[in-house]
Amino acid sequence: MLTLNIKTKFVYGWFSLRNIKLYVDGVLFTKFLAQGTSIIEIPDDTQKLTFVLGKVYPYKTNIYITEEDRKRKEIFMGLHLNHRNLLFFLYDSLRTDYLRSVKLTIEEYASFGKDIYQQEIITLKDNKTSIISLLVSLVILVFSVVQQENELSPIAFMIGLSSTITSLVYFNDLQVEKTTYKSRMISTMLSFVLATLFLENSFLYLRFIIVMFTLMLFTIYLKEVQNQVVKV
């Protein structure tokens, strides 16, 4: 028999009260709790292990047994979720490979779970991006109100209002998670460009001004993401 040592580490303790099904060469072999450490004895001639979490929309992952594994008589592995951050949670959770498995050495097995969910944090030098985002948001908001005869102005108003709230919420945040910051800034800049399509170019070069400030925001953003990255 081969000894299978499994360490399950899910972010935020998700699914910790659920069972994970273990299939040996396509046949259901046993179940174990989706948390902590599990030790299972499997047949020597096992070729493939399949781990399944869930019923309606199950997540699956496979581990293949090699000759080296059979010689050692012991296999160390870890189970984790392919979780990037809360912003991408919905998208990631819809993928069938959300559950991931990995073979480990004894040393890696001992420390498994301590670093797989580390996030990249960048420290912003100042809040220039928040200031510019807020200013552009207010410009869009004000002109969407002024342009009462413009049938598309309500859409611009919603864009301006939502981006204003977002800018205020994150105004003083100087330490941000890199992926979240990147997604937030890209969505903000795209919304600014989109807003120009719903505003009339009635005041001087309104659209040009919004686009220019958006480009300025993009330039500052590129400089910010080049800051030193630390892990927490």
Image (spheres, rainbow, N blue to C red):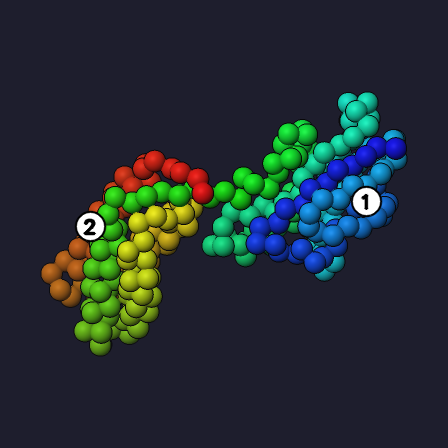
Relative to 168, say whether 214 is above or below: above
User: In the rendered view, does 205 fall on the left or right side of 46?
Assistant: left
Q: Nearer the viewer, residue 117 or 63?
A: 117
User: In the rendered view, does 209 fall on the left or right side of 109?
Assistant: left
User: In the rendered view, does 125 fall on the left or right side of 102?
Assistant: left
Relative to 102, say whether 83 is above or below: below
Which residue corresponds to mark 1?
23
Identity, as a three-letter code, of the amino acid under mark 1: Tyr
Judge the density around disc 1: few (<14), some (14-19), many (≥20) Cα neighbours within 10 Å.
some
Please provide percent x and percent y for residue 184.
37, 53
Q: Which numbered disc, 2 or 1, marks the residue that appears first in the sequence?
A: 1
Q: Nearer the viewer, residue 125 or 197?
A: 125
Identity, as a three-letter code, of the amino acid under mark 2: Met
Q: Nearer the viewer, residue 66 or 137?
A: 66
Please provide percent x and percent y for residue 176.
37, 48
Which residue corresponds to mark 2?
212
Point out the image quarter for the C terminus.
top left
Q: How many marks?
A: 2
Q: Residue at x 53, y 54 (%)?
A: 89
